[in-house]
Image (spheres, rainbow, N blue to C red):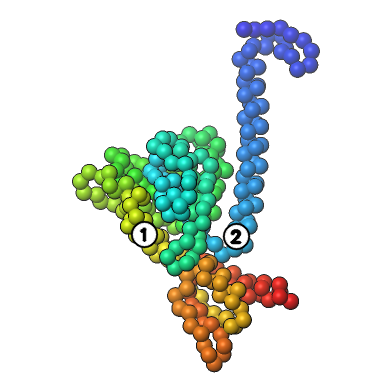
Amino acid sequence: MSRLGGGIGTRGPGETKLETDRRHINRQITDIRKELKKVEQHRDRIRKQRDRTNLFRIGLIGYTNAGKSTVLNALTDSQTYEKDELFATLDPVTRKLELTSGLQVTLTDTVGFIQDLPTQLIESFQSTLEESRDVDLLLHIVDASAPNMETHQDTVLSLLKNLDMDSIPLFTVYNKKDLVDGSFYPTLFPNAIISAIDKDDQELLLEKIEHAVQQELEHYSVNIPSDRGDVLAKLNTETIISKEEFVIETQEYHVEGYTKNKTWIDFLFSHNQDNEQ
């Protein structure tokens, strides 16, 4: 396959087709890495915009084909692609989820993890996995019916450690309980044991998610003037309100609850006041 040639951009003396193909592939790899960098920068800008709000962010993770997309669709009524195959989800999908208290959170589905994932493959999925790196809570979806379930769990936990994500609070969802033969004993806590296609289990999961979210929030107590309905509306959707009463003597709403960041509430008052001025 050796060929001779001359001139700029042509094969040099003795250059083989293999060397030419290798150079061509390396150029493609470089171009793809540049495109991945642009995607990461774009998603980073989107994440920074989210950081300016008080939105609580939840990431769905798990061994591939554990049912992450099914859980996302069941909780948010979205139409995310779901199928019994490896890497059915390659791009991160983020949806808004409203909990029973009215708190709105974001729920992001990511690529499934597989055992002994090569370093090069982790690099390729880096922009996808970045979506889960900055979340406030991870929902670890596990296929409870898988014969090697514990191996799947260990794979995910190991990869989280390799990606420096093992410090993020973790809540395990054992899915596909309807396919389990015999008794089932969970090994990771806290957890929920469900079938994502069962309506009652979907309600149970929402309640458990809200409880897990509340464990990560700060308690707050504020008095809101009666003419600041905008602030009260924001608190209703971006915090969990545990107490709300109108104080006639002061013409204020006394509100207590749980928030991701108490500083955000101070910003909410000052920001809206500046806008009015």
From the viewer's perspective, is residue 17 above or below residue 79?
above
Q: Is residue 225 left or right of residue 245?
A: right
**Which residue has dot 1 on it?**
203
Place of residue 81 in the rendered image (x, y in percent of width and height, measured from the top left): 47, 41
Q: Nearer the viewer, residue 165 or 62?
A: 62
Residue at the limit of the structure toward the bottom, as seen here: 249
Q: Where is residue 67 in the image (x, y as percent from the top left)?
A: 39, 45
Task: Identify which residue is drawn at 53% across, 45% down.
Answer: 92
Q: What residue is shown at x 74% (from left), y 76% (from top)?
A: 277
Return the x and y of residue 32 as percentages of the image width and height: 63, 33
Foreground disc of the pair 2, 1: 1
Residue of label 2: 51
The amino acid type, in three-letter code, at marker 2 is: Asp
* 238 lies above or below 187: below
The amino acid on which the numbered mark 1 sits, given as a three-letter code, is Glu
Regarding residue 133, the answer to whether it shows in the image is no
